[in-house]
Image (tube, rainbow, N blue to C red):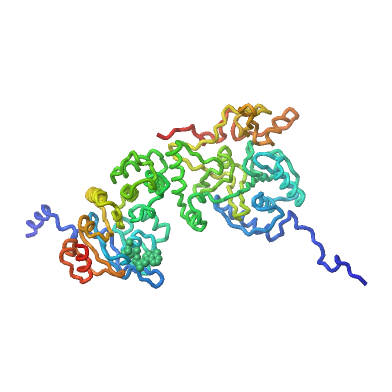
Amino acid sequence: MTTSLAALAAPREDYSYAFLDAYAKRELRRRTLKAIAIPGYQVPYASRELPIARGWGTGGLQVTLSLVGPESVIKVIDQGADDSVNAANLRRFITRMSGAATTTDALQATIIQSRHRIPEEVLQENQALVLQVPDPEPLRAVQSDSSKAHEMHADADYGQMWLVLYEQLVRYKQYIQGASYPSLVNGRYVISPSPIPRWDTPKLHQSPHLTLLSAGREKRLYAVPPYTDVRPLEFEDIPFQVEDQRGWICQHTGAQNKFMNEIPLADGTAAYELSDTGYMEKLSAEANGSTRGATYYDDEGNFYHAGYLKPPVQPD
Amino acid sequence: MPVILNHLSNLIDAPRLVTQTPLLRASGLKKQYGRITAVDDVSLEVYSGEVLGIVGESGSGKSTVLRLLNLEENVEAGDYRLNISGLEAINLFTLARFQRREVQTHHIGIVYQNPHLGLRMRYTSSGNVAERLLITGERRFATLREAARVSLAASEFPLNRMDDPPRVLSGGMQQRVQLAKAIALEPKVLLLDEPTTGLDVSVQALVLDTLKRLQRERHLAIVIVSHDLGVIRTLADRVMVMRHGRVVETGLTDQVLEDPQDAYTQQLVHAKL
Ligand SMILES: Nc1ncnc2c1ncn2[C@@H]1O[C@H](COP(=O)(O)OP(=O)(O)O)[C@@H](O)[C@H]1O
Ligand SMILES: [Mg+2]
């Protein structure tokens, strides 16, 4: 009698729900709760191998997989776009493993996993934003030794971060840090808000939604809970500024005062289009009954928390 | 009798050392690096307005004493107190890292022989000074600029170069930036580790002048380490002689340098004459 190979092998098991096994999910959920309890504090976590290379959003993906349920609605964005290859791959993987639905509408999603952008429409209390973080350590530039950096966070020893800003003002008369602008969470921990543009940083302040930031390579996650203060580091007399894109008009929708991609043209000039493709889609489809939510910046460019952003001041 | 004595005491101040307690008091300091005992049972006191010089051959533990007084390292044994409101009763070595840093920031300034230890060479000179205020939470750019200007001017640094990085400055200028940084928060204690060693003689004389002026104006308690007895003679009121981590002699500068009692001090003084 011949025994088949299949009979000899251990019985085949399907993947766990949402790919991660129960222990991995429990680990992530515990770390996430801790991160929410200590806003801005970087919590280390134990991590599983994933069928996606590190550096392609595995940090965010693990958090998303620990949150997702069959009723979830998932939106995945890469640099503002839902349709990039990376976003599409992540979205396909998450829905295949969880049975969750997908959307490109920021307001319909329960979980938004994103790289480099926060949507233009104000996210709501029932939503979680998961940001993929390539480098979680805001002190990296001034302290390469991570155990020393850990100590500096413990002591709220951020003098050197401020010194970097001082140097920028002396040399360039303005803050020159672009994306990942260091920000103080809940008056206590300085975070790197992942490489979102400065335009998006204020959106983390006193927001109704939960933001989770997770770095796969470093295996650390941190959180901005709903209704928590987030302040970009700025001197009292020289206010932080978002990117100046006044006068940039989206070539497809005519929208202004939202974050734009710049498209260089052959004649040396540039055209502009909304970076948030989900929002652009909505504006184009508005005639067809799609509803648009309130945006963080209105059409005149005013931020929705009045007084949070201040007019520019030149240092002497 | 009491009447006339009272009257007299109003006219003539009692000697300072009788009426005051020392600002800085350290006793029984002991520091080991592996099997080396770098500092062994060292005690010292310094009053406000007084300069204590530490001399001794290379490796005798002078720099280590300064690092201990700057609360940079832990000791094996020792008691260290500053007579500053709120701190009198505390052995500073028992403080947690965070509290130590507070004391260090607010009350102690230090100048190292090697400017690389004391300065960020690629940042602006003004930024090096401003960082002291940033640590204490100052968040107005204009205030930082002004404070940097004031401290750099006090250490006689040319203000037209305040935004040059120390890396492009001469040794003497670098020491002035260190000094400006050290005094930026108006500390009570100033620690100087060979501040003029390696400078040209003429530059050294100018830096010493600046130190003397600051000393007069700010009533600091200064501890200066130097192997140059000329520097000690110029600045120090009292001197402490160290060898192999221990104090071999201590006394008024003139006394010790003119009439040394200890055999080692005699050698040291005569070698330098
Ligand atoms: N960080 C250290 N690690 C090991 N040994 C040290 C360290 N610092 C100083 N020492 C040793 O302690 C002794 C005293 O050094 P130091 O205080 O620098 O003397 P000085 O300043 O009088 O030249 C020397 O033997 C030195 O080699
Ligand atoms: Mg030395």
From this view, report whether residue A301 is shown above or below residue B1.
above
Q: In this view, does B166 lie to the left or right of A26?
A: left
Q: Where is residue B202 in the image (x, y as percent from the top left)?
A: 24, 49
Residue in the foreground of this view, choosing between B13 and B273: B273
Q: Is residue A114 visible?
A: yes
- Total labels: the figure holds 0
Q: Which residue is drawn at 38% across and 42% down?
A: B164
Q: Residue at x 44, y 48 (%)?
A: A159
Q: Residue at x 30, y 44 (%)?
A: B157
Q: Is residue B211 left or right of residue A157?
A: left
Q: Is residue B184 visible?
A: no
Looking at the rendering, the quadrant in which ligand 1 lies is bottom left
Q: In this view, does B18 lie to the left or right of B123?
A: left
Q: Can you say which quadrant of the picture contains the N terminus of chain A?
A: bottom right
Residue in the foreground of this view, choosing between B11 and B244: B244
From this view, report whether residue A242 is shown above or below residue B186.
above
Residue in the foreground of this view, choosing between B35 and A92: B35
Q: Position of residue B269 (x, y in %)?
A: 20, 65
Q: Position of residue A147 (x, y in %)?
A: 51, 58
Q: Position of residue B67 (x, y in %)?
A: 35, 61
Q: Can you say which quadrant of the picture contains the C terminus of chain A?
A: top left
Q: In this view, does A72 lie to the left or right of A249?
A: right
Residue in the foreground of this view, choosing between B117 and B10: B117
